[in-house]
Amino acid sequence: MKRTKISEVLNSTEFGKEITVMGWVRTKRVSKNVCFIALNDGSTINNLQIVLDVTPELDQKLAGVHTGASLSVDGKTVESMGSGQKVELQAKDITVFGDANPDEYPLQPKRHSLEFLREIAHLRFRTNTFGAIFRIRHAMTFAIHNYFNSRGFYNIHTPLITGSDCEGAGEMFQVTTLDLNNLPKTEEGKIDYTQDFFGKSTNLTVSGQLEGELAATALSQIYTFGPTFRAENSNTPRHLAEFWMIEPEVAFNDLEDNMDLAEDMLKYLIKYALDNCRDDVEFLCKRREEEQKQKPANERDEMNLIEKMEFVLHNDFARVTYTEAIDILKNSKANKTGKFVYPVDGWGVDLQSEHERYLVEKHYKRPVILIDYPKEIKAFYMKLNEDGKTVRAMDVLFPQIGEIIGGSQREESYEKLMSRVEELHIPYKDMWWYLETRKFGTVPHSGFGLGFERLILFVTGMSNIRDVIPFPRTPKTAEF
RNA sequence: UCCUCAGUAGCUCAGUUGGUUAGAGCACCUGACUGUUAAUCAGGGGGUCGUAGGUUCAAGUCCUACCUGGGGAGCCA
């Protein structure tokens, strides 16, 4: 079937061309002699206006056309007589592929709540908002590969099924082909995993980092981009059980280089969205502005979406040590006047999200990279500082979203890493292959994990992570 | 998992102190209109008030439990 994409039609200033367009009806307006149909084919957020002179024959066809119906329209591009658009299509003939029974089709030409659209996730692609979000999501995927490829990074596919149950990033989903109603048992009465598909207990990965490090200690610069799975029972607008993560890992990079990479990459991606998804970003910007008007004045954004993106683009991220952050928080007015639910009184405790938000939104008013955390509250593989009590960790904190990136310089000393493994009782049998990177030709190296959906939250201005992934997986929800 | 708020027409919501036959806008159907922009105007159909119990002469409204959803917290990306 030969068709012209609506994005092409709208971008062309040539009138009088005979073309065929196909798409879905957004609205239909009929009067006695003329009928207007707003048609969308997903190639752009904008609709093409179809103009039909009503004849008895067309009238019959149009009877079956409602919001949601799919059409093919043959016609001629003409300069619009109306004020809403430059080009429109004067139709010669239409073919209805499929009607959408208005008694059953849930989408209307009006704003629906995001909660309602989440319940019809199979159809929400057809709304302006979700069309914009998923076009941007695509562009970000492409931009990420582009960023790393053009800088000499290799994309590594790390396994989704993992044999180690201690990747250290959270609860895991078990993968098994055993009959759960009739589990084979060992003599001691435990489950006999030797009879399972892989001959051992396996899980879905929570991170590709450990495998990524293996590749980085040979190819120097690698990145992964794939799904990860966390079986945490977390019900928040920032967490998913299945989400996508980007994990670069670079040999010969220290924490400073790691921070530079993270900041540069985020700015590249935000700029890419502004430069390549202008219509969609503008739509979402307006959408958010309207949403903000419903809120009380003190809860509204100071900047709109585009201003926020540009602000991040044009300002250096604040780089702050954990110890400095604790000092700032301890001496803050908020702390002294009891505004914090968790008052900051000492060194060594993990920061609560209210503290992170204070640092980002109140104190620095820009993205913050927090580094050098106490070793007790961070993962075993992070490089120990000379003080012996902090590690070379970094968290990139964004306004509203919180932690968008978590990373570190890795511990390259076999002895030091081994002693952490022992301290934390991590089973050697699951880790031996990882530890060998430090045994043979070990190098300083660093990396981080970027939560893809959290990036999408930022560049779309959406506030719930379930709205930036087509089919969200969360506790008790896997309908679509 | 904890705290908190909410659930009324297909959608978005109103419903007073517990009191007659539960309302509006949008959507849909019918009609009007020579170019509309989420068209407009007139009329029409559409409800087990989340579910189950309870209090009461009387429950959409009060109480209890459960379910579903939002927001916050923890865990983190």
Image (cartoon, coloured by chain):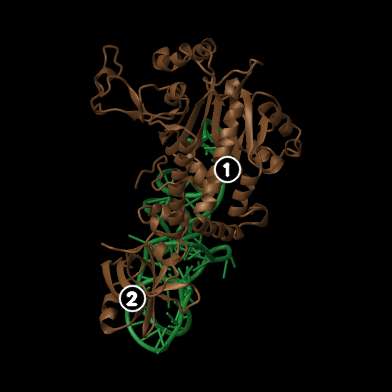
Query: What chain does badge 1 belong to?
Result: A
Kind of element beneath mark 2: strand
From the image, tell me which residue sits under label 2.
A91
The residue at 66%/53% (across/down) is: A302
Q: Residue A349 versus residue A156: which sits nearer the camera?
A: A156
Query: What chain does badge 2 belong to?
Result: A
Q: Determine if marks 2 and 1 fall on one subunit.
A: yes
Q: Quadrant of the N terminus of chain A?
A: bottom left
Question: According to the colouring, which chain is brown?
Answer: A
For chain B, the rendered hue is green
Could you tell me residue A478's position as x and y percent? 36, 43
- The CA distance from mark 2 to mark 1 is 45 Å
Please state which amino acid type lies under the numbered disc 1: Lys
Mark 2 vs 1: CB contact within 8 A: no
Could you tell me residue A414's position as x and y percent? 51, 12
The answer to whether A340 is drawn above or below residue A427 in the figure is below
Could you tell me residue A249's position as x and y percent? 49, 28
> How many labels sit on residues?
2
From the image, tell me which residue sits under label 1.
A267
Q: Is residue A462 visible?
A: no
Please state which amino acid type lies under the numbered disc 2: Ala
Q: Crowdedness of circle 2 by 10 Å Cα count: few (<14), some, many (20+)?
A: many
The residue at 52%/14% (across/down) is: A417
The answer to whether A52 is drawn above or below residue A215 in the figure is below
Q: Residue A205 versus residue A231: which sits nearer the camera?
A: A205
